[in-house]
Amino acid sequence: MPTPKVITPPVAEPVTLAQMRQHLRDDPDLPTDAAEDVDLGSKISAAREMLEHRIGRAIGDQVLEIAIDAFPADGVKLPMPPARAIVAVEYVDGDGALQTLDPLGYWLDDWQSPAWLLPAVGATWPATRQQANSVRVRYRAGYTTCPAPLVEWIKLTVGSMYLNREGEIIAPRASLQAKFEFVERLVDRYRVYD
């Protein structure tokens, strides 16, 4: 399955700065200035992207695009569910011209996860030029309301990033560190398995 390109990233993160500050409330050293907000915002975005990679799902309303070499007979699997709508289907025809497929010629099967782009009943895919990336599918994906376990995973991950601001733990703190197993279990039911 191809990795989609992010055309339009989410405009809002699933965890707000206020939620993150509340989560970190036991930290007396947490400043609330603009520089700290930028740092926390960056960590929230990084944690969301890490989670998307880990579970294979889009978090937050975004537009994605995949490119494949030809229309598969059985349909086009759309990675990074949940897919919510098809924005456009373009293809390079036999003469090398870029065409946009009429929306009446396909439909989104979002009953499954990941969803599939399928030809409309009685329709067939058009012929494409034999070249790399001759078919491009642009679609809206992502949770518009992020499930609570995923929000909690992001808050816990950002909390760890905030507490451990370096790429490694230097002793003697290393002997005091332990990862709670429940943190990874929070996301188990949301993982996409292929």
Image (spheres, rainbow, N blue to C red):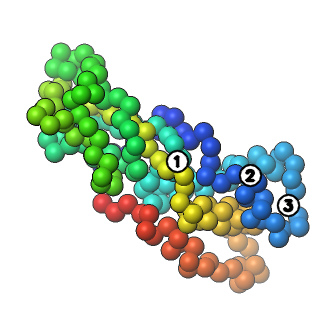
Q: Label 3 vs label 2: CA separation? A: 12 Å
List x then y, in percent, for residue 113. 33, 55
Amino acid beneath label 1: Thr
User: What is the total number of numbered labels drawn onto the structure image?
Assistant: 3
Q: Going from the N terminus, do you reach mark 2 or mark 1 first?
A: 2
Q: Nearer the viewer, residue 176 or 112?
A: 112
* In this view, 63 is above or below 19: above
- Quick one: quadrant of the C terminus? bottom left
Q: Residues within 10 Å of mark 1 (few under 14, many from 20)?
A: some
Look at 25% across and 24% down and name the residue there: 102
User: Circle 3 sits in a helix, a strand or a loop, which is it?
Assistant: loop
Q: Label 1 vs label 3: CA separation? A: 30 Å
Q: As drawn, is 181 to the left or to the right of 126?
A: right
Q: Residues within 10 Å of mark 2 (few under 14, many from 20)?
A: some
List x then y, in percent, for residue 101. 25, 25
* Residue at which label 2 appears: 17
* Residue at which label 3 appears: 30
List x then y, in percent, for residue 7. 48, 34
Q: Residues within 10 Å of mark 3 (few under 14, many from 20)?
A: few
Look at 85% across and 61% down and name the residue there: 30
Amino acid beneath label 2: Leu
User: Circle 1 sits in a helix, a strand or a loop, which is it?
Assistant: loop
* In this view, 168 is above or below 114: below
Do the numbered discs 2 and 1 sit on residues whose CB atoms are within 8 Å? no
User: Circle 2 sits in a helix, a strand or a loop, which is it?
Assistant: helix
Do the numbered discs 3 and 2 sit on residues whose CB atoms are within 8 Å? no
Amino acid beneath label 3: Leu
* Residue at which label 1 appears: 144
Residue 174, by quadrant, is bottom right
